[in-house]
Amino acid sequence: MVKKVAGVLGATGSVGQRFILLLADHPDFELKVLGASPRSAGKKYIDAVNWKQTDLLPKFAESIIVSECTASAFKDCDVVFSGLDADYAGSIEKEFKEHGLAVISNAKNYRREEDVPLVVPISNPEHLELIETNLAKAKKEGKPKPGFIVCISNCSTAGLVAPLKPLVEKFGPISLLTTTTLQAISGAGFSPGVPGIDVLDNIIPYIGGEEDKMEWETKKILGSLNEDKSEIKLLSDDEIRVSAQCNRVAVSDGHTECISLKFKNQPAPSVDEVKQCLRDYVCDATKLGCHSAPKQTIHVLEQNDRPQPRLDRNRDHGYGVSVGRIREDPVLDFKMVVLSHNTVIGAAGAGILIAEILLAKNVI
Ligand SMILES: NC(=O)C1=CN([C@@H]2O[C@H](COP(=O)(O)OP(=O)(O)OC[C@H]3O[C@@H](n4cnc5c(N)ncnc54)[C@H](OP(=O)(O)O)[C@@H]3O)[C@@H](O)[C@H]2O)C=CC1
Ligand SMILES: N[C@@H](CC(=O)OP(=O)(O)O)C(=O)O
């Protein structure tokens, strides 16, 4: 198969660097165009980037000349992944969409737009049907293939919804949900990033905007498409109440979340039924045979002291989510600890898995 041409916006950042690692030797995509700020544009990637990954910079990327983030520089791309700073993503991604490009974005700017799917690929890939509906409509009207934006969720939201989706599918709605996060420093990006003096020997009990994003995005991701697949109906505050508290901790990669939940339907299932439901869940990307899809979507861990970021974040190459300490909660029904790799299934990996799903459906 001829590989699709891919580009990465924000290629020098925390998410951008992860895209480069995950797209090296990818069977479906060939990464040809890298974009970053005017400070980096015109330089060889190796000279523009401050590489911070524990894996070495892949050779193929070293000598690519960094482009400015303009649609003309990316015009030959079948898909453009964005890891842009949100201060700049809004206008750049809009221009790309208007030029007919397919953009899969990590930035928050368009997540709340009605015609933009907000997708965690292991949880709600069906929301991508919104894009298919728009493309079919344009085709029927004899218009050229339109560009589009798909948004990836906030990285903590991705970990949160991963166990919720199978539970809701099997046991019905969740009415109350609380989460307390312990978030890795790579989540704060590299420009400038969290200063060592702030985070070492410390916990920072505030991440700007994060709690609101988790509380809102969960309602869109768990919402459903209307009958003609043209709109996503968010869950209302009456259907689910979500409360998030977010903390930054001195972990390099991997967001941990302590969650508690209550089902609407009572009596609630047993702990064993909850565990079995999570173990049995197979995400659509795995069923479709997507290259990066996790073999096991949710890893249910039985050891009392797991999951731990350093030990568990790379399960299924970071595309799988770990859930441990599943037990009854004396206030709500259950509590558990969830761990997800914030720059893989919470960011770049999610973008690649979305692209693989869109490719399987002939959208890109
Ligand atoms: N890190 C994470 O775990 C997650 C991040 N996100 C989101 O993904 C996006 C990227 O995050 P992250 O990688 O952490 O951020 P970084 O700060 O590490 O990287 C930002 C990128 O944006 C580029 N940039 C900055 N200014 C401009 C400009 N004027 N024009 C074009 N490009 C510019 C930078 O290029 P240069 O190096 O040249 O300055 C860099 O490549 C953000 O929107 C973030 O909120 C979402 C989920 C998880
Ligand atoms: N705020 C997240 C990462 C992020 O940038 O999220 P968002 O794309 O929702 O702003 C973190 O600090 O770990």
Image (spheres, rainbow, N blue to C red):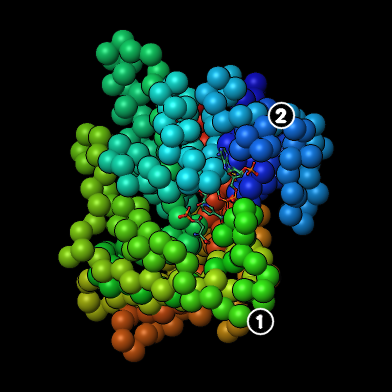
Q: Which residue is mark 2?
A: 42
Looking at the rendered structure, the number of numbered marks drawn on it comes to 2
Q: Name which residue type carries label 1.
A: Asp
Q: Is residue 342 left or right of residue 162?
A: right
Q: Name which residue type carries label 2.
A: Gly
Secondary structure beneath disc 1?
Answer: loop
**First of labels 1, 2 by sequence position:** 2
Q: Which residue is mark 1?
A: 201
Say which residue appears at 67% left-offset and 74% top-offset.
197
Q: Residues within 10 Å of mark 2 (few under 14, many from 20)?
A: some
Q: Nearer the viewer, residue 58 or 313?
A: 58
Image position, residue 305 (x, y; %): 60, 83
Say which residue appears at 54% left-offset and 29% top-offset.
79
* Above or below, comparing residue 159 to residue 134 in the picture: below
Outermost residue toward the left?
238
Q: Are marks 1 and 2 in contact (CB under 8 Å)?
A: no
Q: Nearer the viewer, residue 347 or 26?
A: 347
Judge whether residue 31 can be spotted in this image: no
- Marks 1 and 2 sit apart, C-alpha to C-alpha, by 40 Å
